[in-house]
Image (cartoon, coloured by chain):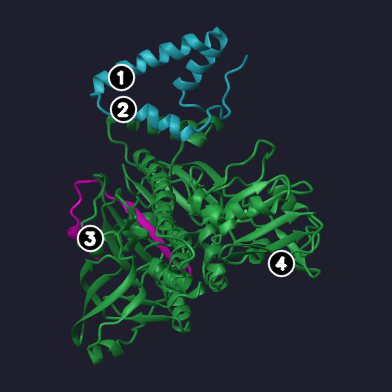
């Protein structure tokens, strides 16, 4: 049994508040949750100083987000913090779905071999935040300011003015750009008057962290209508330190205050675990969820990310996982704009690409919610028929929806992509995140994604050249030649990228494919690089000249 | 031909959502009537009498 001790981060009066001077910062992040802390790390990794404001002085209470998928782990690895998360967390692949008193079917995430990171880990949000805080604290470009509450935000033409309250009173800061990561009930969103619309679900869920020594395997177990919780659903997940997370569906008529009382929660857990299992209830919360998103991720000088920009139902682990990918998309664009290498128009592509991803997430999570909580008697009959048939027949199993687990949404329609020419087949399409593969460099085994780094990178297969970079305007792309700089002994890299001799890929600074060709052509690469950084045709011609 | 009991619908989530959404604004009686019409339409499309007999038996027992 374990009980987590919440750290307390010290409040310090800032120099600017002490001296009463109004200082303009390039980037101010609001909210030190997983998304805000990731934003700070990614902006700092791109050379930008960041100030993070948080109204509290500790980490998340309770396990909350729990599940982290492969793509966020790749992003956190780029920022140098994935390995301890995976080590501390619990990796799992098998999910079981139960209907009433029997197993309906089981699935295996069956992660493809030859990737560095697992498909999914479970880790309490407070552990994850503590690791991110430690990483931020060690970075001289990041200043974490605890007990700093934003009380008003006013937009000017080229900055925002922030009134901030601390234990020492109220002071004023300015920010060239604000990244709002202050969660689903975002105050910043209200301050800028943005719309946040979508669908509310008439259902309530009880979520509990339970410490116990139990012999459940490390799997995701989902029950529809189980004997111990009739008519509703239950989800069980293992986390680090023998802590288990249990989500009970309660229905719309449940009284949230009543249901949170331990006298109500403990009998529910006992009915599920049996009389003999000893457990300690560590944390309990009730929520009603919604699927909605902000009308525009960019509101003048304020950029919204994570739950502040979009809220999804929890089935499929799409909340925090999507938020981390918002930051992956935003940080390099913001750094380019701050360095004057791209115009503000590049930031509009942040909305374009991430709103597209948010809508995809909302669609998936709405469908899962509709399956888990049927709205009518007849739709409940369909749901139960699917679960009954799935026990015996393969055809019904793909229809069972207890949450489709988070995978990255390709930006297939993005204006930053250079369209394929007709000869390009298979592989990784423009707008898609780079596929990892085991390769060798200097004869030593390494991972492909590590070679891509965090700037534009060109990878070409089998081309004979002395060049090591492609430069255009303010940009320099590292040129990696497969066969010269790295080797692909397993052939997996060529297979995943559909490569034959001459195949060339351009990767963006967030490791997404910007363009690809069947042959190597400097001028085309240069043009694609400028397009991926938001330059229009006239601007591209001027910079290329 | 035998009754196909392997997955056969591309994008099953999209199909299921279309089915459920098509009845969202119907009351129970209207939805049950729609289901009857839908079964008859699909049965006609299948056509094969042996397959239909097999499907009726399978649905009747709950799949087992």
* Image quadrant in which the N terminus of chain B is located: top right
Q: Residue at x 50, y 50 (%)?
A: A538
Q: Nearer the viewer, mark 4 or mark 3?
A: 3
- Which shade of the palette goes to chain B? cyan
Q: Nearer the viewer, mark 2 or mark 4?
A: 4
Q: Position of residue A450 (x, y in %)?
A: 64, 66
Pick the front one: A78 or B20: A78
SS at mark 3 in the image: helix
SS at mark 1 in the image: helix
Using the rendered image of the protein, determine whether residue B18 is visible from the camera's viewpoint.
yes
For mark 2, what is the residue?
A378
Residue A183 falls in which quadrant of the image? Answer: bottom left
Pick the front one: A342 or A249: A342
SS at mark 2 in the image: helix
Mark closer to the chain start, 3 or 2: 3
- Which shade of the palette goes to chain A? green
For mark 1, what is the residue?
B32
Q: CA distance from mark 2 to mark 1?
A: 7 Å
Tag 1: Cα neighbours inside 10 Å, few (<14), some, or many (≥20)? some
Q: CA distance from mark 3 to mark 2?
A: 43 Å
Q: Is residue A339 magenta?
A: no
For mark 4, what is the residue?
A446
Q: CA distance from mark 1 to mark 3?
A: 48 Å
* Magenta-highlighted residues: A240-264
Q: Chain of mark 2?
A: A
User: Decide: marks 2, 1 in contact (CB < 8 A)?
Assistant: yes
User: Decide: marks 3, 2 in contact (CB < 8 A)?
Assistant: no
Residue A266 falls in which quadrant of the image? Answer: bottom left
Tag 4: Cα neighbours inside 10 Å, few (<14), some, or many (≥20)? some
Q: Is disc 4 on the same chain as disc 2? A: yes
User: Decide: marks 4, 3 in contact (CB < 8 A)?
Assistant: no
């Amino acid at each position: 049994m374990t009980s987590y001790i919440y750290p307390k981060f010290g409040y310090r009066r800032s120099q600017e508040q002490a001296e009463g001077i109004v200082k303009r910062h390039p980037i101010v992040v609001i909210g030190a949750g997983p998304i805000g802390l990731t934003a700070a790390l990614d902006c700092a990794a791109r050379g930008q100083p960041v100030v993070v404001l948080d109204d509290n002085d500790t980490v998340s209470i309770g396990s909350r987000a729990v599940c982290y998928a492969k793509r966020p782990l790749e992003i956190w690895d780029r920022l140098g913090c994935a390995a301890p998360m995976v080590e501390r967390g619990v990796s799992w692949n098998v999910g079981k779905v139960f209907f009433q008193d029997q197993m309906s079917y089981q699935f295996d995430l069956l992660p493809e071999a030859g990737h560095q990171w697992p498909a999914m880990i479970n880790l309490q949000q407070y552990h994850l935040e503590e690791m991110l805080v430690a990483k931020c604290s060690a970075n001289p470009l990041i200043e974490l300011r605890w007990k700093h509450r934003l009380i008003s935000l006013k937009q000017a033409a080229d900055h925002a003015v922030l009134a901030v309250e601390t234990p020492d009173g109220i002071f004023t800061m300015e920010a060239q750009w604000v990244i709002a990561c202050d969660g689903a009930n975002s105050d910043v969103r209200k301050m800028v008057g943005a719309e946040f619309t979508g669908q509310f679900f008439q259902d309530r869920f009880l979520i509990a962290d339970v410490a116990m020594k139990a012999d459940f395997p490390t799997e995701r177990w989902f029950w529809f209508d189980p004997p111990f919780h009739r008519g509703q659903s239950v989800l069980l997940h293992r986390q680090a330190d023998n802590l288990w997370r249990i989500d009970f569906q309660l229905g719309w008529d449940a009284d949230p205050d009543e249901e949170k009382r331990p006298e109500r929660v403990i009998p529910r857990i006992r009915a599920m675990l049996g009389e003999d299992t000893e457990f300690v209830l560590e944390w309990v919360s009730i929520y009603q969820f919604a699927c909605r998103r902000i009308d525009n991720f960019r509101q003048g000088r304020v950029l919204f990310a994570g739950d502040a920009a979009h809220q999804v139902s929890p089935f499929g682990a799409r909340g925090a996982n999507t938020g981390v990918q918002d930051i992956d998309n935003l940080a390099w664009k913001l750094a380019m704009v701050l360095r004057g290498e791209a115009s503000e128009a590049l930031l509009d592509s942040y909305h374009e690409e991430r709103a597209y991803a948010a809508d995809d997430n909302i669609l998936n999570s709405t469908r899962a919610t509709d399956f888990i909580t049927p709205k009518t008697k007849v739709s409940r009959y369909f749901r139960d028929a699917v679960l009954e048939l799935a026990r015996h027949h393969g055809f019904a199993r793909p229809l069972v929806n207890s949450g489709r687990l988070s995978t990255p949404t390709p930006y297939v329609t993005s204006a930053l992509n250079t369209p394929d020419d007709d000869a390009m087949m298979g592989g990784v399409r423009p707008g898609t995140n780079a596929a990892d593969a085991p390769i060798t460099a200097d004869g030593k085994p390494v991972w492909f994604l590590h070679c891509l780094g965090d700037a534009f990178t060109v990878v070409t297969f089998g081309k004979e050249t002395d060049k090591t970079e492609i430069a255009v305007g303010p940009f320099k792309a590292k040129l990696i030649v497969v066969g010269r700089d790295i080797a692909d002994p397993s052939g997996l890299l060529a297979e995943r990228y559909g490569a034959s001799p001459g195949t060339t890929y351009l990767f963006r600074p967030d490791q997404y494919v910007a363009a690809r060709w069947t042959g190597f052509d400097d001028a085309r690469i240069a043009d694609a690089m400028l397009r991926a950084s938001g330059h229009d045709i006239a601007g591209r011609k001027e910079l290329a000249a | 031909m035998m009754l196909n009991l392997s997955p056969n619908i591309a994008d099953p989530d999209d199909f299921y959502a279309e089915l459920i959404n098509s009845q969202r604004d119907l009351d129970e009686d209207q939805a049950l009537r729609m289901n009857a019409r839908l079964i008859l339409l699909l049965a006609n499309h299948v056509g094969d009498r042996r397959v239909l007999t097999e499907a009726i038996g399978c649905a009747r027992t709950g799949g087992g």
